[in-house]
Image (spheres, helix red, strand yellow):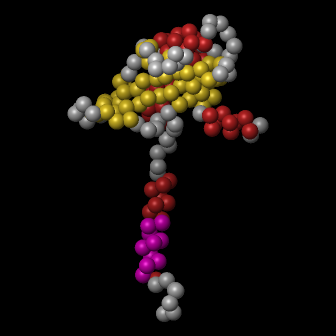
Amino acid sequence: MPPGLMQPRLALPACVVFLLALALGACAPSLSPLYRDYEVAPAEPPIVQRIEAALAEAGWQTAPASAPNAVATEERKMSSWGLYTVVVSLEVVPVGDAYVRLYVHPYRKYFTGGRGKIPYLNKTLQRAVLKDLNAAFEKQGLRAVGTSVERDRRATSR
C-alpha cells in the first residue's frame, strides 16, 4: 500500500467514534443561562417596590442585597435528591429604565455540608423558579423578554 493512504482498519474506529459522538450530542439536555430580562412598563410605584411586591407574591422572602439597587431573596429549597438538596436564591437588578435582570443562583447542598454552584438552568429547575415569578412580575408591569441573546434576536429579525 502506498504511503499516505489510510489503512482501512483505522477508518472504521474513527467512523464509529464520530457516529457515537453525534448520537450523544443529539441527546444533550437543553441548558439555559442563569438570568432573565424583563421589560419595564412605566408605572407607579417605583421599580424596586414593584420588584419586592412581585417576589413576595411569588413566595420569595427578600434579604439584604450586595448592591444598593438590587433586590435579593433568601435561599429556597427546590428539590431534594438524597445526597444533595437543590437551593436557589434570586437577585433582581434594574438595568437602566427599560429592563430589569433576574439572576438565579442555584446551588447543590450536599449531605456532607459542602456546596456546589449549578452553572445552568435545566428545564425542570427553570419551570420551578420562573413559573410563579413570571406571573407575579407580569402583574407588576414587568414583561418577560428572556435572555439578552433572545431579546436581541427578536429585535434584529423584525
As drawn, the residue found furthest toward the bottom would be 1
As drawn, the residue found furthest toward the left would be 112
Q: Residue at x 55, y 21 (%)?
A: 93
Q: Is residue 150 left or right of residue 156?
A: left
Image position of 83 with respect to 27: above or below? above
Image position of 60 with respect to 82: above or below? above
Q: Assign the C terminus to one quadrant of the image.
A: top right
Q: Quadrant of residue 99?
A: top right
Q: Is residue 16 magenta?
A: yes
Q: Position of residue 135 (x, y in %)?
A: 56, 19
Q: Quadrant of residue 78?
A: top left
Asked if residue 62 shows in the view, the reply is: yes
Asked if residue 72 shows in the view, the reply is: no
**The magenta segment:** 9-18
Q: Residue at x 50, y 90 (%)?
A: 3
Q: Position of residue 39 (x, y in %)?
A: 65, 23
Q: Quadrant of residue 139?
A: top right
Q: Position of residue 45 (x, y in %)?
A: 62, 6
Q: Is residue 145 left or right of residue 78?
A: right
